[in-house]
Amino acid sequence: MSQLERRIGLVSVVAICLGAALGSGIFVLPGIASELTGPSIWLAYAIAGFCVLPAAVSKSELSTAMPTSGGTYIYIERTFGPLAGTVAGIGLWISLLLKSTFSLVGFGAYLAVFTDIPVQQTALGLLIFIVGINLLGVSKLSKAVLFIVMLVLFSLGLLLIGGSFTFEPRRLQPLFPEGFQGLLAATGFVFVAFAGVDKVAAIAEEVKDPGKNLPRGILISLATITLLYTSLSLVFVGNLDGDALAQDLRPVYTLAQKLGGDVAGILAGILGVLTLTSMANVGIMAASRFPFAMSRENLLPSIFAYLNPRFMTPTVSIIFSGLAIAAAIIFVPVDKVVKTASAFMLCIYIAENATVILLRENRVQWYAPPYKSFFYPWLQVFGITVCLGILLLMGQIVGITIGAAFILGGSVYLLYGRTRTNRKGVVGIRGRRQDLIEERSPIVAERDELFFFDQAAVVVSLFGEERSPEVLLELGAGLSEGGKVEVVHLTEIPEQLSVDDISVETSVIKSLRRRFQAMSIDKNFLVEFEPIVSHDIYKTVHEISNRLHCNWLVKEWGGRSRGNITIHNQMGWLEEHLACNVATFKDSGIRYFRKIMVYVDQGPHNPLIIKTCVKMGEMNDAELIFVRWVPEDFSEKRVKAERAFLREATSVFAEESNSLVIQGRNELNDIVALTADYDLLIMGALPPQSIIDTMFGSKQDKITAKSACSVLRIQTSGL
């Protein structure tokens, strides 16, 4: 695989972010956008910046988890699969190219201050120049961008200060000449101004210490850009006539000339030329990384992944992007460029927020970002909702944009990528796996190790974050009744990586192997230990349970600590469809189980659960107490009936056990409070009874999470 060198530090990250955003967003766009909403254009910028925040935070998290070239394309492809990735990659590439096109057109407008050369010819000439600069390498480009960004910030700061002294509040009336709908339309229109803020993630593979520099750079840049856009657009409407501003493609020049005369106007023209050149430069740099990344994933021809051996830049991808911009300059009207780019950026912001939720809630093992979003998942939900609302108000352009992206991206995937990749993405792997249900015979293993397994009574699955693997092994040995226990350590990797390239014998694996071997000797367990690397750990778990014909699968409770909602619990769904019983253990740090509480929920009780509880009691020489909860308004007669039911249900297998019926107002709180008196709580694991249970946790989930003692949940096979 072609690799890029990490050369870019935090200062350059901020410079690239600002360089990609500063430009047409303030040098050209305010005039066009003010026609939609009038003097409230500054408010449209402020709202747009606030709406971009969730996506910027999500992008920061995603970029630290997957710091590789391609940015959002990579995140969407790994989450939703290659078809969605192809659509997103091509759409992002086009949107960045359109923004660069807009910058080049704006460059022509500012250059008209000095010359009468036609805008189109000027833009094409500059395009050739910046394609050449990009071919020389990012390190050279980032140094030039840093100088221009500092110059622009200083100059715009002077313009902001000067314009505040001549500000006329009367020009703000009426503030909403086109009503609230006009404000929202302008908000959707100016989203393209923020498109470059997070595009440094597209070159994340070239950033030093991406876990820190990417989120810091993105969020610093967003705050800077939002403040600058909002304040400068307010100064524009407070100094310039509304009708004239609506037709002005160079408002910075117009304001500078008004404040400082022709000299200031000329300086502003020079500043506009430099800024728009820088922005187009960075736009091509970021855009060219999408074909480069897609080519490495076999979704575009391999020629797009070619790196120049001297400058280490994706030469073909850069040149191809330049040719596409040239076509847009010649054939696409400016207003259509802005609307199309803004509409697609809103769609991408929605996808980025959704991607964070899906990766977190599906508990993808390889997804471990150094930076994590604050206010998760509510910040992402807010971002999705707001962007959807603005899209609906943007009208027909949204349908055209999305339709065109799907047609073009879908065609590329069907004609090229579909036959060259078999990846599913996290959504495909974590979905409702009909392939696992329909195929009862063992499926083809991903690693040869699976073929060496002999039949085992119990399989203990380790996913890498267990508090005490030894306790799980002891539990498995007890359930095996002297049979063989197979301990499997599962490591999940993205589909883009080859399992053969991952070292299985890590220090963690060596430590586990040593400890399990010592336990097997000390306690006379029949134990085998196997580390497995897999793209699909759920498929692997299903395959192992089938291949070994085991009676029990033992695993640690994963909890709900990584998120607040669960859209689809893949492990819970898999447990319901395994051909074996499942024991899920929550370790609260208690090592000796002298007093065990068995929570008997409503409905008929499964004899296997009672027999297992008795076995656990004998194994630990523990006192066994069966507990049932009833509401406090139950009559004495009904309470006696519950006691009789409890004795009858347990007496066959647990003659020496005790039983307890408790009354209270809140079942969850009462059971949790009672767990303080016990070392272990055992209860049946029921599947979610409603969508609310799935999203926020069932009663058993909440009891498990809040219990003061360790918890063993038992789910018997329904197959």
Image (cartoon, rainbow, N blue to C red):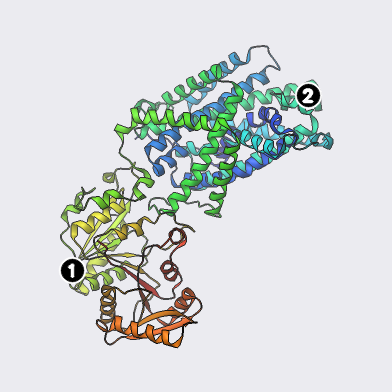
Q: Quadrant of the C terminus?
A: bottom left
Q: Nearer the viewer, residue 717 or 69?
A: 717
* Residue holding disc 2: 257
* Residue holding disc 1: 526
Q: Can you say whether 360 is above or below 221 in the image?
A: below
What's under tag 2, amino acid-wise? Gln
Residue 484: assigned label: none
Mark 1 / mark 2, whichever is N-terminal: 2
416 sits to left or right of 381: left
Callout 2 environment at 10 Å: few (<14), some (14 to 19), or many (20+)?
A: some
* Disc 1 and disc 2 in contact, CB within 8 angstroms: no
As helix, strand or loop, the secondary structure at mark 2 comes to helix
Residue pictured at 41% horizontal, 70% vertical: 704
What's under tag 1, amino acid-wise? Leu
The number of discs equals 2
**Measured Cα–Cα span from mark 1 to mark 2:** 86 Å
As helix, strand or loop, the secondary structure at mark 1 comes to loop
Query: x%, y% of residue 200?
Result: 52, 37
Q: Nearer the viewer, residue 697 or 537?
A: 697
The image quadrant of residue 520 is bottom left
Query: x%, y% of residue 452?
Result: 16, 55
